[in-house]
Image (cartoon, rainbow, N blue to C red):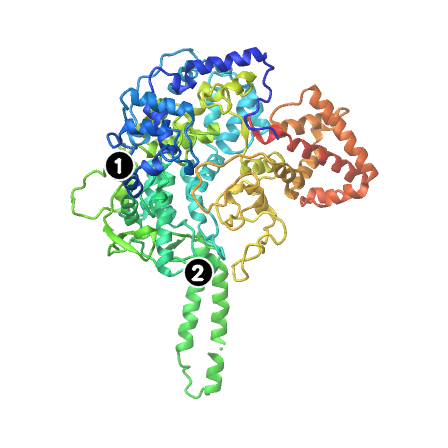
């Protein structure tokens, strides 16, 4: 499988042209050391952060021992620093050899030039509120949106030339996959290609965003970020019912809930004056952490771990910071002190519930529910439960009454009563059968009396130190003052501070992640870390522009997505000259369309969609598609509930991947093989690998084979394809359904040879054809019984399956 950045379809370039292209970019400014003036932000800070801050950074314990700090101005004798970094003496050179982080000559040159220029310092870029700047000059009339002007200006300053727009088939496939996670249908492609209006593309964008699939696709990224799963993780990895939270996330994106409200409700939805069910459900964000089994750790230790996990999740999801690094000591790279961490901890430790534990410690073991939680029964379930509860209450009352006839013998009375109790037991069993299917979700709830918070010495749960008050990190803008300055700050205050326009992080972090969804990489590549160890933004002014506009729009997510996909930047072709890939292999300058391997869920959903199998059913409890036998027994202890994977059947097996049951101890292998996380921790971006195992999975996954057979059967049964050249029409229809474009002559010839070869193969091995057909669960396929029919269907199945395995099918162009 080619690299996601390989120049597929690129033109052959003259080697001399490639060399001069690289030189042009180098001269244009790719080498900071050759710039007229050294930038502390771009050139110096990354060197200091990577090589010096571990000993001379924010951590007071380390910098006190080292004698000075290099992360703030005026602390260091820079002449001495210069002597040390240029020294050849192993006892005095910095960084010391044992750190295994020697400075390169060009890095020494940058530091020397910076010191010679007076060693000017700047605050870290992400800790300063974004500022509005003038739009760059309009270079090309078509590139007139603010986004395009920022991108084109940066691109041309580096000697790069943009690519033309991609063709319409590429654009509709790209848009459909990016906005809904599903490929376009043949009818959608036809409608778009025949629409000659000036607004055809913009109208397509609107139609896609209006689809329910938009929310399902957007939610998938968020569920990674907040580490949503169906089990507790760790040890027994018991089941935990939280699916209403997932449904709320999907609805929020489809209803375009303002993103600031989306954040507030998750951090503090339970603290609204009269919280509704949606707001309570959203507060379940605070309950998505891992849970240690009862008996594995002391309750006090479990409680501390849960609160630390909550704070860490807030840091990653909303602030783009690695707050957890300050659990045991001051952060070594960012100005986050241990006191800052526990000041945030104080907002989340006032949980009105016992130490959360897995297993039978919960009030409803089968659903993994531990107070506080809410139930969300349907109208039908409510009526059934009301009827059963009333009948149980009537029988319980009857069991306590003495019969009117005083001559009733004790034996008869007793018999009338293990009978009444038997009826009660039967009704209880019926009620339990209903309850186990009632949606329920864990929520957050505040204690009336505030629990004090301490700095934990070295992060140990049983070593409390100084008491700390609720507060935000000292290096960020403070919370707005309230009418009562003496009143304790609440999680609602924290939530509102998080989305206050003065907060420099939240909007930047959010728009960067939405950009990442559409381009494969964010303007800040390290979307999980906006701190000193993170990468600088490729387009800092554009990032600030997007953040400011996002806030001014009322945190309009759908509006932000529209503004990005409607740009020339987004619509560029990914086919580019070789020199473009050599000069900018990661496409950080955005001089071509992005190209990368699709995520696991999109690959699976696409197969089911193009084969006509994907279920449109939304929401509800997680489902278990077919997976290898005995999957969970290798990771589950005998007392786990459940400890055996039992696949669902029927329509549930072909629902969208966002609804797939996610066991942290062993997530769906179809997903993890394509780099899906186990969701033990908050993941802001997935890695993308290309491995032989992925190809083996795609070629051998039973559900994919079954889907291929279903599509093959539909092609053979389609009356519009029954003609003298029917097979050619079928081949073209199969290829277009899967790839969104018709086959060219070479592809047609290759498909024809493949069909002929498979037909010959199965004619010589009819038993293999029978076995292949019988493995498909589609009733229409199972009705195929004669040998010639089975041979023909098997041959077509293999052709369809081969097309599904093409690189272009699992690649976003």
Q: Residue furthest right?
A: 764
Residue beneath disc 1: 475
Secondary structure at numbered mark 2: loop
Q: Is residue 632 above or below residue 340?
A: below
In this rendering, position of residue 118 left or right of residue 47? left
In this rendering, position of residue 194 left or right of residue 39? right
Residues packed near mark 2 inside 10 Å, few (<14), some (14 to 19) or many (20 plus)? few
Q: Which mark is residue 296?
A: 2
| Residue in the image at 37% along x and 60% along y | 299
Out of 206 and 290, give the one closest to the viewer.
Answer: 290
Out of 536 and 516, give the one closest to the viewer.
Answer: 536
Whole-number angstrom distance, CA of label 2 to CA of label 1: 38 Å
Image quadrant where residue 554 sits: top left
Image quadrant where residue 260 sits: top left
| Residue in the image at 42% along x and 14% along y | 28
Q: Where is residue 233 in the image (x, y as percent from the top left)?
A: 47, 52
Q: Position of residue 209 (x, y in %)?
A: 46, 30
> In the rendered structure, are the residues bearing label 2 and label 1 in contact, judged by CB atoms less than 8 Å apart?
no
First in sequence, mark 2 or 1: give its number: 2
| Residue in the image at 50% along x and 68% along y | 426
Q: Where is residue 121 in the image (x, y as percent from the top left)?
A: 28, 26
Residue 534 visible? The answer is yes
Viewport quadrant of the C terminus: top right
Q: In this view, does 528 lie above or below 744?
A: below
In this rendering, position of residue 793 left or right of residue 49? right
Image quadrant where residue 694 sits: top right
Out of 316 and 659, give the one closest to the viewer.
Answer: 316
Secondary structure at numbered mark 1: loop
């Amino acid at each position: 499988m080619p690299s996601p950045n390989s120049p597929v379809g690129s033109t052959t370039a003259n080697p001399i042209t490639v060399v001069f292209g690289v030189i042009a970019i180098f001269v244009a400014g790719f080498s900071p050391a050759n710039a007229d003036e050294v930038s502390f932000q771009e050139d110096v800070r990354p060197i200091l952060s990577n090589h010096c801050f571990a000993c001379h950074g924010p951590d007071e314990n380390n910098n006190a021992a080292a004698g000075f700090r290099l992360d703030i101005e005026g602390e260091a004798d820079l002449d001495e620093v210069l002597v040390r970094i240029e020294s050849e003496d192993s006892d005095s050179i910095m960084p010391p050899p044992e750190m295994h982080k020697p400075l390169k000559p060009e890095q020494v040159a940058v530091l020397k030039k910076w010191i010679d220029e007076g060693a000017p310092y700047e605050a870290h870029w992400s800790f300063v509120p974004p500022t509005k700047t003038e739009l760059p000059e309009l270079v090309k009339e078509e590139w007139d949106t603010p986004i395009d002007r920022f991108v084109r200006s940066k691109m041309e300053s580096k000697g790069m030339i943009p690519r033309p727009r991609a063709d319409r088939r590429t654009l509709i496939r790209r848009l459909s996959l990016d906005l809904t996670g599903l490929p376009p249908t043949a009818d959608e492609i036809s409608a778009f290609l025949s629409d000659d209006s000036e607004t055809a593309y913009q109208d397509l964008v609107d139609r896609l965003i209006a689809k329910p699939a938009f929310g399902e696709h957007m939610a998938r990224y968020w569920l990674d970020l907040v580490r949503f799963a169906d089990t507790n993780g760790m040890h027994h990895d018991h089941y935990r019912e939280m699916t209403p939270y997932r449904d709320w996330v999907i609805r929020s994106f489809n209803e375009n809930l303002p993103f600031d409200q989306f954040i507030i409700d998750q951090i503090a939805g339970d603290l609204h004056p009269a919280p509704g069910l949606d707001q309570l459900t959203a507060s379940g964000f605070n309950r998505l952490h891992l849970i240690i089994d009862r008996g594995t750790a002391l309750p006090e230790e479990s409680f501390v771990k849960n609160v630390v996990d909550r704070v860490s999740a807030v840091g990653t999801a909303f602030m783009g910071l690695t707050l957890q690094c300050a659990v045991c000591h001051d952060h070594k790279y960012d100005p986050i002190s241990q006191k800052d961490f526990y000041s945030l901890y104080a907002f989340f430790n006032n949980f009105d519930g016992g130490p959360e534990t897995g297993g039978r410690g919960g009030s409803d073991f089968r659903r993994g529910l531990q107070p506080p939680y809410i139930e969300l029964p349907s109208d039908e379930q409510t009526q059934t439960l009301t009827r059963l509860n009333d009948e149980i209450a009537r029988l319980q009352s009857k069991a306590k009454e003495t019969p009117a006839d005083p001559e009733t013998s004790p034996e008869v009375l007793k018999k009338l009563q293990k009978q009444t109790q038997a009826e009660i037991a039967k009704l209880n069993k019926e009620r339990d059968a209903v309850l186990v299917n009632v949606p329920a979700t864990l929520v957050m709830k505040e204690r009336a009396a505030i629990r004090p918070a301490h700095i934990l010495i070295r992060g140990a749960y049983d070593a409390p130190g100084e008491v700390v008050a609720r507060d935000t990190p000292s290096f960020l803008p403070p919370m707005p003052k309230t009418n009562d300055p003496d009143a304790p700050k609440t999680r609602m205050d924290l939530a509102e501070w998080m989305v206050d326009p003065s907060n420099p992080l939240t909007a930047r972090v959010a728009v960067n992640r939405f950009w990442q969804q559409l381009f494969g990489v964010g303007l800040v590549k390290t979307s999980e870390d906006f701190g000193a160890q993170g990468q600088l933004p490729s387009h800092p002014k554009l990032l600030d522009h997007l953040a400011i506009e996002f806030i001014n729009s009322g945190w309009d997510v759908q509006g932000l997505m529209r503004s990005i996909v409607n740009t020339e930047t987004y619509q560029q072709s990914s086919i580019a000259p070789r020199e473009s890939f050599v000069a900018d292999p990661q496409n950080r300058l955005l001089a071509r369309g992005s190209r990368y391997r699709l995520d696991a869920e999109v690959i699976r959903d696409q197969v089911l969609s193009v084969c006509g199998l994907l279920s449109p059913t939304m929401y509800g409890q997680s489902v278990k598609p077919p997976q290898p036998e005995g999957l969970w027994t290798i990771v589950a202890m005998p007392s786990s509930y459940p400890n055996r994977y039992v696949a669902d059947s029927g329509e549930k097996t072909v629902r969208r991947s966002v609804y797939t049951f996610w066991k942290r101890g062993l997530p769906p292998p179809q997903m993890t093989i394509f780099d899906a996380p186990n969701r033990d921790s908050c993941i802001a971006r997935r890695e993308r690998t290309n491995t032989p195992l992925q190809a083996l999975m795609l070629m051998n996954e039973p559900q994919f084979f079954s889907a291929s057979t279903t599509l093959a059967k539909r092609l053979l049964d389609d009356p519009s394809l029954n003609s003298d050249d029917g097979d050619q029409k079928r081949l073209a229809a199969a290829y277009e359904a899967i790839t969104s474009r018709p086959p060219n002559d070479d592809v047609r010839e290759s498909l024809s040879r493949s069909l002929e070869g498979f037909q010959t193969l199965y004619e010589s091995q009819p038993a293999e054809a029978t076995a292949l057909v019988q493995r498909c669960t589609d009733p229409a396929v199972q009705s195929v019984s004669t040998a010639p029919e089975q041979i023909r269907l098997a041959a077509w199945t293999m052709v369809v399956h081969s097309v599904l395995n093409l690189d272009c099918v699992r690649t976003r162009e």
